[in-house]
Image (cartoon, grey):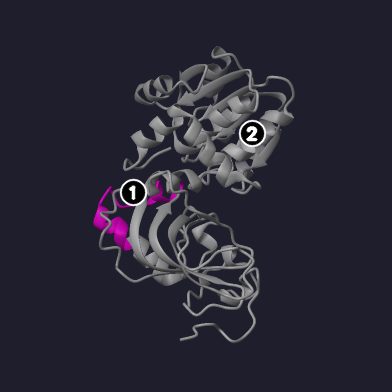
Amino acid sequence: MDHRIISASSPLGLHRVVDPPGVLPQAARRLDPDPRIGPDEVRVRVERLNLDAASYRQLHERHGGDGAAIRAAVLEIVAERGKMHNPVTGSGGMLVGTVEEVGPDSPLGLAPGDRVATLVSLTCTPLAITDGLARWDGLDEQVPADGHAILFARSIAAVLPGDLPTPLALAVLDVCGAPALTGRVVRAAGAAPVVAVLGAAGKSGSLSLAAARRAGARTLIGLVRDDREAGLLAAAGLADRVTVADARDPVAVEAAVRAAGGPADVTVVCVDVPGCEHGAILATAQGGTVVFFSMATSFTAAALGAEALAADVTMLIGNGYVPGHAEAALDLVRSSAGVRDLFTARLGHSPQE
């Protein structure tokens, strides 16, 4: 049976926007997850969702760690919005699944039977869940699921590698934009810069440290929230200096980074809680760069805070996409035992940085 929608579709997914009309899918309140595909679309049978850290933390805290309530909240969001788009954090995550059908005009290079990870946010991916998330206890960011998702012509997906476990590959691909952009910024910063990573023992933080090292950083400073995190990061050997501070305390962050060899020429923020903007700015040298990878970042607070502090810093939003980002991140995991150890320690333990 041919499931294809006969009418033409937009490569941007505009035809899937139900409310309000005229906006792009990410900004929409609701998408249409109809399983029939347009000529340039792809339908994926969903195997597992990976909720982004900020979204899962908010749901975990909102429902007091009650797994059943968290599961019900995710189901409600998907049913109401036709996508996984947390209305509080504005973030979503990504998914793994198997390609079921490919439209004849799809440019993505996928074929039925390919196991893929979507590299676009669930906030702009039409999604339907059909199993009630019955296999998920609500206590982890990775969500076993059955249902379908739709990819557009402008979507991005990567065929899963055969040499890494699916949960590990999914966790890496969920944050693969962070190390790619970190590497680019470090290379552009000049000879042997000092790099500080806030939330350095987390998924994006550990990858960003490894990418900064590969890109030629002189000194790597890893800032973490407590002594347990410090022990994990020190054992992984990814940072030259490991320091502990609350990333929400600007004065403490500045002091910790300076004591560890700062200020930093490049500061990378990988912490999934609000209020880390001003500490990152204070920890960065004049003329330096701050890269924000957290969906909990207030870019208003960052911009106005830099102005108030007379901080001449360039501030970048990590948008999750750099050409070649997926393979580069997977290569870091393959080549760095420290990164693999941190990911293995964190898989299945939420909420996380």
Viewport quadrant of the N terminus? bottom left
- The dot on residue 212 is none
In this rendered view, identify the residue nearer to me: 5 or 293.
5
Front label number (1 vs 2)? 2
The amino acid type of the residue labelled 2 equals Gly
Judge from the rendering whether residue 280 lies leftward or rightward of residue 338; answer left or right: right
Pointer 1 and pointer 2: residues touching (CB < 8 Å)? no
Please report the residue visible at 47 percent of the width from the left and 19 percent of the height from the top: 243
- The dot on residue 183 is 2
Residue that numbered label 1 is attached to: 60
Where is residue 275 shown, x and y percent of the image? 51, 37
Please report the residue visible at 37 percent of the width from the left and 49 percent of the height from the top: 141
Q: Is 63 one of the magenta-colored residues?
A: yes
Where is residue 145 shown, x and y percent of the image? 34, 62
The overriding secondary structure of the stretch rendered in magenta is helix
Please report the residue visible at 51 percent of the width from the left and 71 percent of the height from the top: 30
Q: Is 296 one of the magenta-colored residues?
A: no
Question: Magenta part of the protein: which range?
Answer: 54-72
Where is residue 286 shown, x and y percent of the image? 72, 24
Give the structural element (helix, strand or loop) at label 2.
helix
